[in-house]
Amino acid sequence: MYPETKPAEDLTEIRSFLLSERDKSLSETEWRFRMRGYGYNLRRTERGMEIARLPQNAVLGTLEI
């Protein structure tokens, strides 16, 4: 139910977690809110959804949606 407590550094692992949580959410707003609770900031850009680690807001990569 909850991701492991260690921070995931592998982008494929993060991507699968984000997409599985997206399936559980009713809207993009709810999904982004839930991800902030897990320590990820999601920002929509022209290339897709930018993934950043909180609280530093360090960009990890982009999720093409």
Image (cartoon, rainbow, N blue to C red):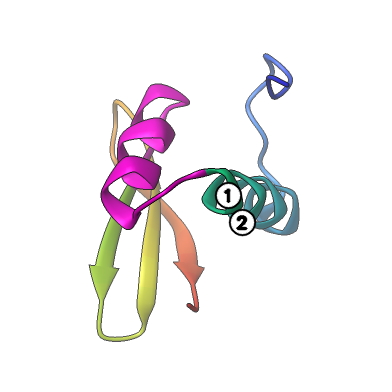
Residue where numbered disc 2 is placed? 19
Picture quadrant of residue 21: top right
Secondary structure under badge 2? Answer: helix
Please, what is the three-letter code of the amino acid marked with disc 1? Leu
Taking depth in this image into account, of 57 and 23 the one nearest to the observer is: 23
Q: Which mark is residue 18?
A: 1
Please, what is the three-letter code of the amino acid marked with disc 2? Leu
Provide residue 53's location: percent of width, then percent of height: 41, 38
- Residue found 57% across the figure and 44% down from its top: 24
Tell me if 12 is positioned left or right of 57 in this view.
Answer: right
Is 38 magenta? The answer is yes
- Residue found 71% across the figure and 54% down from its top: 16
Provide residue 45's location: percent of width, then percent of height: 25, 75
Is 56 magenta? The answer is no
Q: Which residues are magenta?
A: 25-41
- Residue found 38% across the figure and 77% down from its top: 48
Are circles 1 and 2 on residues that touch, CB within 8 Å?
A: yes
Tell me if 8 is positioned left or right of 21 in this view.
Answer: right
